[in-house]
Amino acid sequence: MASASTEERAALSAADIATPAPPQTPSVTLRKPTFTTVDRLRPGTSGHTLTVKVVNSKLVLQKARPDGVQLRQVRISECLVGDDTGTIVFTARNDQVDIMKEGVTVILRNAKIDMFKGSMRLAVDKWGRIEATEPASFVVKESNNLSLVEYELVQVEGQ
């Protein structure tokens, strides 16, 4: 068995090391968001996309929280938001408070329902998005406030 010379081995290894073509990434097709209405929101659900008007906004907490060396401002605001089917309380945190001003129309993407003292609260976490948009043409139905409905967690026996 003849051994390959040093030059042949260098040529072979250089050919073997040639950079391969980048892997083909499958094309991602984005789906259109399906907008829902306030009256269709249910406890424990998430992934909602809604267009709502801010009826009112009230700052409920503003304090400095230590974040390493500096103090970080924490702001929480409860905003009554709604559409032509009903209203619900939205909990705005930090930068969201600046967007959620009275009379503004916003699109809430990937919103979720949190439960607070037995009632529903709408929220957008780090995976969601809030965008201000053109004023909506609908009139907010304030008589159907879903946050005033009190829910109770019931344990089912045998499961």
Image (cartoon, helix red, strand yellow):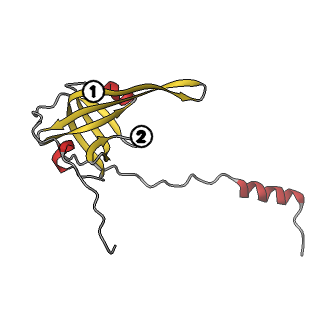
Where is the C terminus found, in terms of image quarters?
Answer: bottom left
Report the residue at 17% width, 28% height from top. Answer: 135
Residue 19 position within the rendered picture, expressed as x and y whole percent measured from the top left: 66, 51
User: Compared to 123, does 134 lie above or below?
Assistant: above
Report the residue at 30% width, 45% height from top. Answer: 117
Check if mark 2's residue and mark 1's residue have beta carbons within 8 Å. no
Residue named by callout 2: 126
Report the residue at 26% width, 36% height from top. Answer: 107
- Name the residue type under label 1: Lys
> Could you say whether the residue bearing mark 1 is in a helix, strand or loop?
strand
C-alpha distance separating marks 2 and 1: 22 Å
State the mark number for residue 120.
Answer: none
Q: How many marks?
A: 2
- Decide: few, some or many residues near mark 2? Use Cα within 10 Å; few <14, some 14-19, many ≥20: few
- The quarter holding residue 93 reads top left
Report the residue at 34% width, 49% height from top. Answer: 30
User: Compared to 55, does 86 lie above or below?
Assistant: below
Residue 31 position within the rendered picture, expressed as x and y whole percent measured from the top left: 30, 50
- Name the residue type under label 2: Lys
> Could you say whether the residue bearing mark 2 is in a helix, strand or loop?
loop
Please indicate whether residue 18 sits to the left or right of residue 113 in the image. Answer: right
Q: 102 or 158, which is in the foreground? A: 158
Where is the N terminus found, in terms of image quarters?
Answer: bottom right
Q: Earlier in the sequence, mark 2 or mark 1?
A: 1
Residue 106 position within the rendered picture, expressed as x and y whole percent measured from the top left: 25, 32
- Decide: few, some or many residues near mark 1? Use Cα within 10 Å; few <14, some 14-19, many ≥20: some
User: Compared to 120, does 106 lie above or below?
Assistant: above
State the mark number for residue 58.
Answer: 1
Please indicate whether residue 9 sits to the left or right of residue 124 in the image. Answer: right
Q: 68 or 25, which is in the foreground? A: 68
- The quarter holding residue 79 reads top left
